[in-house]
């Protein structure tokens, strides 16, 4: 039997392998670092010290002790250190110490996912058991059985939950949690950087409701936030909690040597600058590592991509390792399935996992040695989180970022300095987005009546106007100086924190008539292009064909099939400006910002063959148009560009395609959250225009940030196109495969005409 190679041997082989080296743009080695430690705090309870020593911990990292001291002094903190730097002790120690000295003290831990809460429960319970003390820590989520819930409410010192449960199951029933809220001393918000965009804007309002209930019961908890690296952790923590926070951002934890490789697949068509598929290159690289039983995590941008790579890898190693040694992991899988995968990774039974960014978070999956990214994850913060999943236990680690042909990937891969030296992106939230705010005012009124003169977060005098509006809508009624909830229904149930639009589509597997079951769910906008009739939906490497999509009932009925293709759909978008809030005139262009209405319609889908990725058929999609009212920034051209209609249109389409890749970089958003569309003749000013709109009702501040940084976004995009090696446009810059000899030149000219005078610095 062939001997398995270790990671060092494979790294040495990679460095000598000419074919591999040809595709390496940058090999960046980050040296390991020694720990910076300090003795335990003098007041730390002897039983906690014993418990830590049993786990082999005899000192604290510097950031852990600083956090302990500030929290004990009653200050709210935000700790920002890399993955696997012992952030958990930053909050577990002060919380456990307080409970040991005040047995009625309570703490609420909030994690963005159930998996993280389960993971952290086992971590704190290890300390509690080793200390031999009577402290109860429980998770409270959708999987908590009804008979356990009462025990959690009455006896839980530490309750771990997620924002969705806090919003829909704890706050509305606060009267069952009286002793918990009366004694609430700490609120821990882990993975702070996740709370951005729509989700963060919702959660900021959930925290406003939490603080309002705490005030009612006479408690004022200290807030403890932890975060991965973002540009504005302090600002985000203060916006989310509306509390004054102390920043702890130096890291005392050790780290092993990490090799960060930027890998660009070879060009297969020189004139069109088309590269080999990133997915196929990832298969080759991951296959080599997995055959040697080197634990590897592969990240992919989309659910579809996860399932395609999973299918390839399972096929590749099934004879050597067995198909169950490589698993998929993404949102939409059921909890039991996810727990099983996490356990298999920790025990080493599973060698490989293919995941969306669901495993970017700190779920303990043991010491993986390699992290491979299929394409740039969309933000620097995300990329570092994914890289952090490899080498969590001092050892050497390898991170490979394999670029796709997309303009964004090519920009990042050709500019390693941008990646390694640029400060990470800013996370944006807008808690006062009217649609989100009104939803949470309804929930807050259900929880406790509003009194005249009360505030809600930063909403002062305007609050009464909003309450009066809800009274007119017959949602609230006013009696004296109080507003009461007047509906029988329960508002939190109809409000999803994950989107500003409601209702997900449920996916029902009817392959086996005797065992019809729900296998996942998906938001409506994604369902238009991924769950239309005849779509191939992929789940754990199996293919399902959508037989029926009941749009009214939000149900997609699927059946397992075996085909050699997947599907991809087109979305046609119409946009109208409703109101102009701001306008800036430049030399040859104008930049605007305001409210817009967007109509989106799924039109046709294509069948794309595995392996060759060629188009083997298409069909129409029959779904109603979805309408969205949101905010947008735009840039319009003056009269000075004389290209003729055809070339103007060609230039606009090319420029918009390139901008769609670069713009999300500047606002730290998923490319799905910010859409870019061109119009040869915009309705509101009849000029060639490119729009950037937030893909959420009411907008969440992304396009507003584009409005203020438009000059930099346009300049960077122009430079990216100019640097591209193709002759007249390709998928790596303007997207069209030489739609015309002048396509690339027209896009560059268009962007140069748009350019303004302002710049923007990263602080």
Image (cartoon, helix red, strand yellow):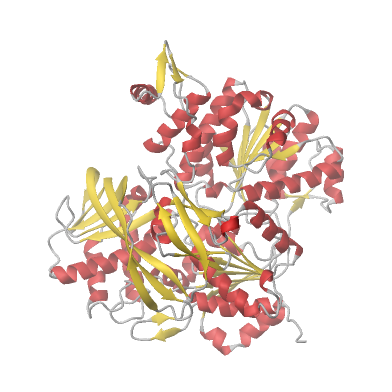
Give the residue at the far front of this rendering: 514
Foreground residue, 84 or 351?
351
Image quarter where the N terminus lies is bottom right
Query: Viewer-proximal residue, 109 or 155?
Result: 155
The answer, for residue 404, to whether it is visible in the render is yes
Quarter location, residue 711: bottom left
Location of residue 85 with respect to 640 vertically, above or below? above
Residue beneath the point at 81% across and 38% down: 44
Number of numbered discs present?
0
Judge left or right: residue 19 versus residue 408.
Answer: right
In this rendering, position of residue 599 left or right of residue 51? left
- In the rendered image, the residue lying farthest to the bottom is 18
Residue depicted at x 37% and y 86%: 270
Vertical placement of residue 480 versus 206, above or below: above
Does residue 174 lie above or below 320 as drawn?
A: above
Instruction: Tell me which residue sits at (68%, 55%) in the image.
Output: 339
Across and down, in percent, residue 278 comes to 49, 75
Query: Is residue 37 toward the left or the right of residue 571 in the image?
Result: right
- Judged left or right of residue 555, residue 12 is right
Residue 589: image location, x then y, percent = 19, 57
Can I make out residue 352 in this image? no
Residue 749 % position (x, y): 22, 69
Residue 241: horizontal and vertical position, in percent?
53, 36
């Amino acid at each position: 039997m062939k001997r398995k190679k270790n990671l060092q041997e494979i790294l040495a082989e990679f460095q000598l392998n000419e074919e591999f080296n040809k595709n390496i743009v940058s090999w960046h080695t980050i040296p390991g670092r020694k720990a910076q430690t300090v003795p335990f705090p003098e007041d730390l309870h002897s039983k906690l010290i014993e418990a830590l020593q049993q786990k082999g911990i005899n000192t604290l990292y510097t950031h852990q002790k600083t956090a302990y001291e500030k929290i004990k002094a009653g200050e709210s903190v935000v700790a920002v250190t890399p993955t696997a730097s012992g952030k958990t002790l930053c909050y577990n120690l002060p919380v456990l110490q307080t409970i040991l000295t005040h047995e009625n003290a309570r703490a609420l831990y909030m994690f963005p996912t159930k998996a993280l809460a389960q993971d952290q429960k086992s971590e704190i319970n290890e300390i509690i058991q080793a200390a031999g003390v009577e402290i109860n820590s429980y998770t409270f989520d959708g999987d908590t059985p009804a008979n356990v819930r009462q025990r959690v409410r009455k006896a839980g010192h530490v309750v771990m939950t997620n924002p969705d449960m806090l919003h829909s199951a704890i706050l509305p029933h606060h009267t069952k949690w009286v002793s918990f809220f009366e004694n609430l001393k700490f609120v821990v918000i882990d993975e702070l950087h996740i709370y951005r965009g729509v989700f963060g804007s919702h959660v900021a309002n959930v925290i406003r409701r939490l603080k309002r209930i705490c005030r009612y019961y006479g408690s004022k908890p200290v807030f403890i936030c932890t975060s991965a690296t973002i540009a504005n952790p302090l600002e985000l923590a203060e916006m989310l909690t509306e509390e004054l926070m102390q920043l702890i951002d130096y890291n005392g934890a050790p780290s092993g040597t990490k090799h960060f490789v930027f890998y660009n697949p070879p060009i297969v068509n020189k004139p069109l600058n088309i590269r080999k598929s990133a997915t196929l290159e990832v298969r080759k690289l991951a296959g080599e590592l997995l055959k040697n039983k080197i634990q590897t995590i592969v990240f992919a941008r989309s659910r579809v991509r996860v399932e395609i790579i999973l299918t390839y890898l399972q096929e590749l190693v099934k004879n050597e390792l067995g198909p169950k040694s490589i698993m998929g992991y993404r949102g939409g899988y059921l909890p039991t399935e996810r727990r099983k995968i996490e356990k298999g990774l920790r025990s080493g039974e599973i060698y490989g996992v293919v995941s969306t960014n669901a495993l970017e978070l700190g779920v303990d999956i043991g010491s993986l040695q390699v992290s491979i990214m299929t394409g740039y994850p969309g933000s620097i913060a995300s990329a570092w989180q994914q890289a952090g999943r490899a080498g969590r236990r001092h050892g050497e680690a390898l991170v490979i970022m394999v670029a796709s042909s997309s303009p964004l990937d090519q920009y990042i891969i050709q500019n390693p300095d941008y990646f390694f030296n640029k400060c990470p992106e800013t996370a944006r939230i807008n808690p006062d987005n009217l649609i989100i705010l009104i939803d949470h005012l309804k929930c807050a009124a259900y929880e406790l009546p509003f009194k005249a003169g009360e505030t809600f977060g930063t909403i002062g005098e305007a609050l009464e106007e909003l309450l009066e509006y809800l009274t007119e809508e017959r949602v609230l009624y006013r009696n004296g100086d109080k507003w009461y909830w007047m509906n029988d229904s329960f508002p939190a149930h109809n409000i999803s924190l994950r989107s500003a639009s409601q209702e997900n589509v449920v996916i029902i597997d009817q392959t086996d008539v005797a065992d019809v079951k729900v296998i996942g769910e998906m938001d409506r906008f994604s369902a238009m292009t991924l769950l239309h009739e005849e779509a191939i939906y992929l789940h754990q490497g199996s293919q399902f064909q959508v037989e029926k999509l009941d749009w009214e009932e939000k149900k997609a009925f699927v059946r397992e099939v075996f085909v050699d293709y997947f599907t991809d759909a087109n979305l046609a978008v119409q946009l109208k400006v409703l109101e102009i809030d701001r306008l800036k005139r430049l030399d040859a262009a104008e930049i605007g910002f305001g409210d817009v209405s967007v109509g989106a319609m799924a039109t046709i889908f294509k069948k794309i063959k595995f392996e060759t990725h060629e188009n083997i058929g298409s069909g129409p999609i029959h779904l109603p148009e979805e309408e969205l009212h949101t905010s947008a920034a735009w840039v319009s051209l003056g009269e000075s560009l004389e290209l003729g209609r055809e070339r103007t249109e060609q230039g606009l389409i090319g420029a918009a395609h390139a901008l769609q890749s670069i713009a999300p970089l500047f606002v730290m958003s998923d490319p799905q959250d910010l859409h870019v569309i061109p119009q040869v003749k915009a309705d509101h000013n009849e000029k060639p225009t490119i729009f950037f709109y937030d893909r959420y009702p009411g907008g969440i501040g992304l396009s507003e940030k584009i409005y203020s940084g438009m000059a930099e976004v346009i300049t960077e995009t122009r430079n990216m196109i100019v640097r591209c090696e193709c002759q007249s446009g390709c998928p790596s810059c303007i997207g069209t495969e030489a739609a015309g000899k002048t396509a690339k030149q027209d896009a560059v000219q268009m962007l140069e005409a748009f350019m303004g005078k302002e710049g923007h610095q990263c602080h």
